[in-house]
Every structure is written in structure tokens, then in C-alpha cells.
Amino acid sequence: MTDAERHLRADAARNVERIVRAAREVYADVGPDAPLEEIARRAGVGIRTLYRRFPHKEELIRAALDQSITEDLSPAIERALDDDNPLRGLTSLIEATLSMAAREHNTLAAAKNSGTLTAEVSAPFLDSLTLLTRRAQQASLIRADLVPDDVCRIMGMLTGVLWSMDHHSDGWRRYVTLILDALSPIGASPLPPAVPMQQEPQDGCWPMR
Amino acid sequence: MTDAERHLRADAARNVERIVRAAREVYADVGPDAPLEEIARRAGVGIRTLYRRFPHKEELIRAALDQSITEDLSPAIERALDDDNPLRGLTSLIEATLSMAAREHNTLAAAKNSGTLTAEVSAPFLDSLTLLTRRAQQASLIRADLVPDDVCRIMGMLTGVLWSMDHHSDGWRRYVTLILDALSPIGASPLPPAVPMQQEPQDGCWPMR
């Protein structure tokens, strides 16, 4: 590769990074239907550059989601799994997920609308939540009768409340506390049977409208 | 009024009742986008009779919802308010609401899609749930720190899980039990502050997609 080629590639990568970051900002400010022209403008690139990097809108939305997961959620997952108290780890990961879902609310809505909010998106943190739940159960810190589908549904219940509040608020914390009380082994009532998940498989645990 | 007029009116009322009941059945069997022709066929009336009684589809959907509320939810509300144990009353009304929402899932979805699922629809049972919550709080049967907006959001969390299961199952009972454990004063953690409801005012507590 010549120096000129290397320079071109680095330039292209910087453009992609800038466009994706601009997309997250514009979705947050304008809403899930924000026009691509506005994203190009915010990124400081021409609309043709944007289309060259992201021929389909879905690819840009998915890249925006992936960037936010890599930057915000992945470090939280690592920290949570390293916590020597699995309940504290579980709590911190639930909070990180809700915090990200609140901040990236419009990006998530855009992903939902465009069909790119697949189960694959939620798999990394859902698997970690399930693992932390099992560890906390083994340590008798949360009720023994929870199953993995409960974890998915509980995350759905929690992300569902985001629709009822200002996205800039952290009012969701109240419902995390309520749910953690529900998960406590103290005073736990016997649970009726768990039925299998039957939502659209692509939906994962995102109960988006 | 002549006998003939009386006869005609009774006939019209019977037709309306039959069409509305057929609509609920057809939505349940076929889905929220069921064609009006199918509803007319099931009711045993001509499509022109259906259009004469319900010039707009929204009116039929709303009538179907009202019929199901009158038949299923109103008696449950009365029984719950009459229960001398307010927690048992609250529990039975939550269960009746979820049971109705599961059974009438497609009618609710049709109402949501057509914009007729207004807050007005949920007001009667929501007011009763709030009243029963207050009574149960006064009897120290549920935690003292719940506010009315919590009741609305909790019902939203519970109806939200319906999307993840076969509508004919009563798998939602598991999450009612979990939530009732969350509402118990036993082992209740201090709650972060409640933030005001900010959803579309017409949405009520129905977190429909």
C-alpha cells in the first residue's frame, strides 16, 4: 500500500466514524425519522459521501446502534461480569442498559422502524444478564425460581417504561428498584409457570412500539 | 311508536349487538386487520347493514372494545371494589385486566392502530386500580411510596409482556406475582423519585406497538 492509499483509507474510516456519530446526535435531537441530509450536514460531509459509505439507511442506523453498544454497553458488561458481587454486577448492567436505551431512544426507534433491531443486537447484554442472574441465584442473592425468559421479559418491562417519560430523565431508576425488590428472595411468593417466548424472533427483548 | 316501529328498532339493536360481537370474534381469529366483509359474514348481516350501523371502521372497533369492557371488566371492577381485603381486590382487578387484554389482544391492537385506544378507555379501571392501591396502602398491605403514575406504568409493564407470549396462555400470571412481590411492603427498598408521565395523552396505559 502506498502512503497515498493509506491516507485515503484513514480518511474514509474517519468519515465513517464521523457520519455514525453524527447520526446518533441527529436522531437524539430530531427524532427517529431524521433526514439523511441533516446527518451528512452534521458530519460535515456531502450527501454523496454518506450514500457511498452507507448505501442503505438501515446500514447507517445499525452502525449507529453498534457504535453506541461498543462505547457504552460493552465496558459496562465487562465491569459487571468482573464484579465479585453478582447482584451488584446485575444491577449495574441493568442500569447501564436502561441508561443507554434512554439516551439512544430515537436510534433504537429508528432501528425498530427499519427492521434492524434484531435479537442479535440484544444478545451480548442479554447473555451477560442471564449469566449474572444465575450467579446471583447461586449466591442466594436473587430468587431461585427465575428462568432466562424472565430476564428477557423483565428487560422488556423496564425498557417499556421509557416511553412514558422524558428521555433525558432517569425516572426509569424507580422501576429498576421496584423490579430488584421483585427479584429479591426475601418474601418471594411461589411463581406461576413460565411460558415460552413467542414474540417475533427478530425482536429480541426490545418492546418498541 | 307503532308496533312496527318498535319491531324495527329492536331489530336494529339486535343487529348492532350481533355485529359488535362478531367483530370481537373475527379480530380474535383473524387479527387486527380483519376485513369488515368477514365481520358482516360472521354476524349474518349484509355489508351495507354493517356500514349503515358503523359508517367508520373506528366506530365498530371502539364499540367492540366497549362491549368487552362492559361484559368482562365492569363486573370485575365492582367485585374488586367490594372486596373487604383491598390487596385481594387489587390483585383480582389486575388479573381481570390482563385476562381481558390477552383475550381481546387483537381488538386492542386494532383500536391502537386506528387511534381509538384513548386514555378514556383505560380510565375506569385505572381509577379503580388507583383507589384500591390507596386502600391497600392505608391497610399497610402494599408499600406506602407508590404514586398513581406508578400504577399506570406497572399496568403498562404487565400488558407489555403479553406481546411475548401466546395470547391464549395465561403466562402473564407469573409477572403479576412478581410485580405483587415488588409492591409488598416486606423488604421494600427506598424508591428513586417518580417522574411525570410524558407519553402521548391519548395512549392511556396501553403500551401497544
Image (tube, coloured by chain):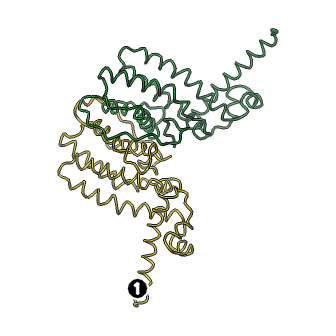
Chain colours: A green, B yellow
What is the residue that sits farthest to the top in this orientation? A3
Residue at 44 percent across and 80 percent down: it is B11
Q: Nearer the viewer, residue A141 or A169?
A: A141
Label 1, secondary structure: give it: helix
Tell me residue A44's x, y (percent). 71, 25
CA neighbours of label 1 inside 10 A, class few (<14), some (14 to 19), many (20+): few
Residue at 66 percent across and 31 percent down: it is A60
Where is the N terminus of chain B found, in terms of image quarters? bottom left
Label total for image: 1
Residue at 48 percent across and 32 percent down: it is A168
Above or below, comparing residue A131 to residue B175 in the picture:
above
Tell me residue B51's x, y (percent). 55, 71
Q: Which residue is mark 1?
A: B6
Left or right of residue A128: residue B147: left
Chain letter for mark 1, please: B
Left or right of residue A151: residue B176: left
Residue at 49 percent across and 59 percent down: it is B27
| Residue type at the position of mark 1 | Arg
Quarter of the image for residue A38 reads top right
Above or below, comparing residue A6 to residue B164 in the picture:
above
Quarter of the image for residue A2 reads top right
Quarter of the image for residue B118 reads bottom left
Left or right of residue B146: residue B206: right
Left or right of residue A11: residue B157: left
Tell me residue B23's x, y (percent). 48, 64
